[in-house]
Image (cartoon, grey):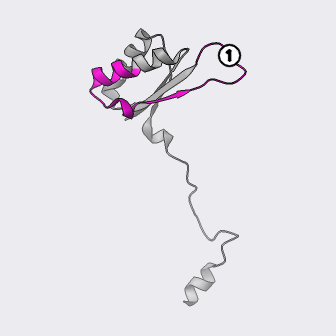
């Protein structure tokens, strides 16, 4: 699976792209996230991002639809790279109230 996202200068273009992507790829439009990137100090335009995850063989179609609606693909990464990083625990943590000696006595 791939995580893909695209930026648009106008929300209406992003919404049109979402509808087209949903129809073309046969997915629920709710599965394609959309959100404003507008800031109060940027009164012109309504920058918007569109994001979803798809099987790798559908990404080219996503990119084509995005381009047809005036958007720019800004993210196209393997979904595994989007998981939260979790440190590997390699022994007692310095702040852990139990240490290995306590565990051996139990």
For the C terminus, the quadrant is bottom right
Q: Is 100 included in the stretch rendered in magenta?
A: no
Residue 67 visible? The answer is: yes
Residue 63 visible? The answer is: no
Residue 87: x, y in percent? 58, 55
Residue 84: x, y in percent? 53, 47
Q: Is 44 included in the stretch rendered in magenta?
A: yes
**Stretch in magenta:** 18-46
Tell me the residue at 52%/29% (across/down).
35
Q: Is residue 53 above or below residue 62?
A: below
Q: Is residue 105 above or below residue 69?
A: below
Residue 27: x, y in percent? 30, 30
Residue with the mark numbered 1: 43
Q: Is residue 52 above or below residue 72?
A: below
Question: In screen coordinates, is 26 left or right of 51?
Answer: left
* Residue in the foreground of this view, choosing between 88 and 75: 75
Q: Is residue 15 above or below residue 79?
A: above
Pointer 1: residues within 10 angstroms few (<14), some, or many (20+)? Answer: few
User: Can you tell which quarter of the image residue 55 is in?
Assistant: top left
User: Can you tell which quarter of the image residue 33 is in?
Assistant: top left
Residue 58: x, y in percent? 32, 25
Tell me the residue at 38%/33% (across/down).
30
Which residue, as the protein is rendered here, is positioned at the far right? 41
For the N terminus, the quadrant is top left
* Residue in the foreground of this view, choosing between 67 and 32: 32
């Amino acid at each position: 699976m791939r995580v893909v996202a695209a930026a648009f200068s106008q929300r209406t273009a992003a919404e049109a792209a979402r509808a087209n992507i949903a129809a073309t790829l046969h997915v629920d439009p709710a599965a394609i996230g959309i959100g404003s990137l507008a800031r109060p100090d940027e009164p012109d335009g309504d920058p918007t991002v569109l994001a979803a995850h798809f099987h790798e063989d559908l990404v080219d179609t996503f990119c084509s639809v995005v381009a047809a609606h005036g958007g720019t693909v800004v993210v196209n990464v393997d979904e595994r790279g989007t998981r939260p990083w979790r440190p590997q625990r390699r022994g007692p943590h310095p702040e852990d109230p139990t240490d290995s000696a306590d565990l051996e006595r139990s």
